[in-house]
Amino acid sequence: MKRRDFINWVGLGWIASSLPVAIAACSSGTTSASGDWQTVGTSAELDKTGQLLAKNSPVGPVLIIGTSKAKITAVNPTCTHAGCTVAWKAEAKKFACPCHGSEFAVDGKVQKGPATNPLKTYAAKIEGNSVVVKPT
């Protein structure tokens, strides 16, 4: 066997053995059976107070408001002004930042500055006993 043929065979073998690793790396973005919906908590946790804060969820920090019997809303609770965690004020139906007073509507839009950008929102639903979200 010539040296060039040997190098070609070794190269082909390396490519063939690396293919499964490359395929696994490219398809690792979806981690749940229902696409890219991610579980962030249970409906029982949400129903206790009408809100659920998942600081370390698979999609990042998520604050879900509502109950398993009604419409739920999910936002990233990180204020777009200074990075503080906003709180849900149920009586006023708004998210409020404790650091500089920014206020956001239930859909994440800015109602009062100094923040100028809306909160990131997620699609949210109850699936069985789980609360699941999907970045929009």
Image (tube, rainbow, N blue to C red):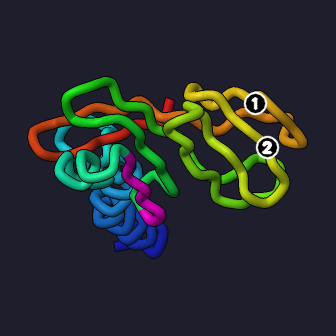
Q: Residue at x 71, y 60 (%)?
A: 84
Secondary element under disc 2, as helix, strand or loop, is loop
Residue 102 % position (x, y): 79, 43
On the rendered structure, is 80 left or right of 41?
right
Q: 10 Å neighbourhood of mark 2: few (<14), some, or many (≥20)?
A: many
In the rendered image, the residue lying farthest to the right is 114
Residue 106 % position (x, y): 56, 28
Q: How many marks?
A: 2
Q: Residue at x 46, y 75 (%)?
A: 3
Secondary element under disc 1, as helix, strand or loop, is strand
Residue 114 versus residue 1: which sits nearer the camera? 114
Q: Which mark is residue 78?
A: none
Q: Is residue 22 above or below residue 80?
A: below
On the rendered structure, is 89 left or right of 6?
right
Residue 22 % position (x, y): 38, 57
Residue annotated with mark 2: 102
Residue annotated with mark 1: 110
The residue under label 1 is which amino acid type?
Val
The residue under label 2 is which amino acid type?
Ser
In magenta segment, residue 105: no
**Residue range corresponding to the magenta coloring:** 51-56
Q: Is residue 131 above or below residue 15?
A: above
Residue 85 position by quadrant: bottom right
Please indicate, yes or no, whether residue 60 appears anywhere in the rendered image. Answer: yes
Task: Evaluate if marks 2 and 1 touch, with contact meaning CB atoms under 8 Å apart.
Answer: yes
Residue 38 % position (x, y): 31, 47
Q: Residue at x 35, y 53 (%)?
A: 28
Q: Residue at x 19, y 29 (%)?
A: 69
Please indicate, yes or no, whether residue 8 appears anywhere in the rendered image. Answer: no
On the rendered structure, is 103 left or right of 105?
right
